[in-house]
Amino acid sequence: MKSDSGSSLDESQESELVQNLLACAKAIQEENLELADSLVDRINFLSLSYGGAMRKVANYFTQALAQRINKIPPQGSPEASYLDMHQPHFLKSYPYMNFGYYTANQAIVEAASNVNRVHIIDLSLKHSIQWQVLLQAFAMRLGGPPTVRLTAIGLPQADNTDSLREVGSELAHWAASMRINFEFHGFEFNSLTDIDASLFDIRPREEEVLAVNSAFELHRLLAEPGAIEKVLNSIALMNPKIVTLVEQESSHNSPVFYDRFSQALDYYFAMFDSHESTGFTKTYDTLDLRMSDVYLGRQICNVLSCEGPDRVERHETLSQWRERMCAAGFEPIHLGPKALVHANLVLALFGGGNGYQVQKKDGGLMLSWDSRSLVATSAWQLAAAAP
């Protein structure tokens, strides 16, 4: 694990900090809470010598460790509305979400080439940016854009606001400005396991192509036994031409705490380091940067402090998702060269992307920092639909 660029920290000091973090996780797993508590104090002392990514990692991880040791319930709730509260700031500050959106969109564009009607079901609509980009791509299509119908699924909001309607209105204006026939329908469900496809007016493929999209959402179903299988089976029954899946590329679903901790430590260090090392912190809004850190910190807390149904940030690798998708009757669709072009376009928008790599791996497209894969986009079709 490397320190962030520009740091003059001694590598042995960094190694000592990492070793103490891992030792603390091991002590917790072995239920030696007295030792774990003393190691938290030691880590806090060592972290004072650091800045940048390493200090952020140490601070957020020790907060999570202390909460677990002292059995303090995490602040807030495990609900997506709380965990995703600062996601818009993260979207602006890091390239990862835009990478997922742009590459998934390209797969949908290619699946919907030469058709007159497209129906997209978004399993967790939180903001408009992904679909603004897709509508723009459709507007530039040779022969003119298709009619686009977007069915958006969201959770009831704690403040009772109708965020789906707000996003739908924004997208309707955006589509009208590009002269695209556009329909929007929003549905709130307490869980994706409650979705009722009969409400979505799914039409025969000869009349309308169906695409189902999930970005940074399906991993949360893994907290409830059988939920992911139920939802994937429901999607299969909709007979989509394509399913696009964007997920964080890490294994944070292990029942073994130490394994989960070590994976999370590697993952979130790379995430913070990518931002510190590229110099984005000098050009981005201070509030966006601070709230992006809080967004990641809440994920860390959920991964490490929570158990049972409260632990919803259960990220898995694409190879694990491949097993789940294939078991539900899907097979991967090759992401073409244009998806790679769009991925590199995203990096250009974020200052050139020095240090990032885009790789084809495990049948999908991955965005990596310093060779550590962080986000994966994949596309799927029903196996019976393969030529």
Image: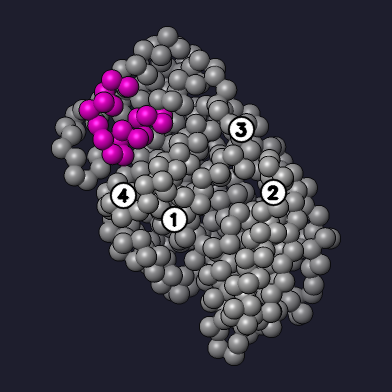
What residue is shown with label 3?
77
Instruction: Find numbered disc 3 in the image and state the secondary structure of the residue it sits on.
Output: loop
Mark 4 and mark 3: span between their CA atoms?
29 Å
| Label 4 Cα neighbours within 10 Å, binned few <14 / some 14-19 / many ≥20 | some
Mark 4 and mark 1: span between their CA atoms?
12 Å
Query: Which residue is depicted at the point 54% across and 63% down?
Result: 129
> Are discs 4 and 3 less than 8 Å apart at CB?
no
Magenta part of the protein: which range? 44-61
What residue is shown with label 1?
92
Mark 3 and mark 2: span between their CA atoms?
18 Å
The C terminus - image quarter: bottom right
Instruction: Find numbered disc 1 in the image and state the secondary structure of the residue it sits on.
Output: helix
Corner quadrant of residue 333:
bottom right
Residue situated in front as seen by the camera: 82 or 78: 82
Mark 1 and mark 2: span between their CA atoms?
23 Å
Q: Amino acid at mark 2?
A: Thr
Query: Which residue is depicted at the point 44% across and 31% down?
Result: 261
What residue is shown with label 4?
281
